[in-house]
Image: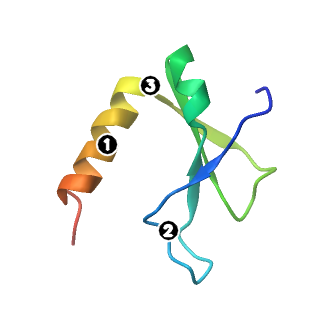
Amino acid sequence: MREQVWVKSSYSGGEGGNCIEWAPGHAATGTVPVRDSKDPHGPALRFDASAWTAFVAGVKAGDFDA
């Protein structure tokens, strides 16, 4: 994967846990890479851009609230 600008989720806590980052500039290729912000050199998962968009919309709508 080429060098990307990574964006930390606004839903990530400030305590150092449960933090993800995604690379929005890569979405034009049809996939969105997502990684653990605590392990920036570790693996990144790739999601279909439309699936990622639907997931983010669900998070914003509260569909996954416990």
Calculate the distance from the C-alpha at mark 3 to the C-alpha at mark 1: 11 Å
Task: Say if mark 1 contacts mark 2, CB within 8 Å.
Answer: no
Q: Dot 1, crowdedness within 10 Å: few (<14), some or many (≥20)?
A: some
Q: Residue at x 56, y 65 (%)?
A: 19
Q: Is residue 56 left or right of residue 22?
A: left
Q: Can you tell which mark lies on residue 48?
A: 3
Helix, strand or loop under label 3: strand
Which residue is labeled 2 in the image?
A: 12
Between disc 3 and disc 1, whose residue precedes? 3
Please state which amino acid type lies under the numbered disc 1.
Answer: Phe
Q: Dot 2, crowdedness within 10 Å: few (<14), some or many (≥20)?
A: some
- Residue 55 at what x, y percent from top left? 31, 42
Q: Is residue 29 above or below residue 55?
A: above
Please state which amino acid type lies under the numbered disc 2.
Answer: Ser
Helix, strand or loop under label 2: loop
* Residue 62 picture quarter: bottom left
Q: Can you tell which mark lies on residue 55?
A: 1
Between disc 1 and disc 2, whose residue precedes? 2
Calculate the distance from the C-alpha at mark 1 to the C-alpha at mark 2: 15 Å
Q: Quadrant of the N terminus?
A: top right
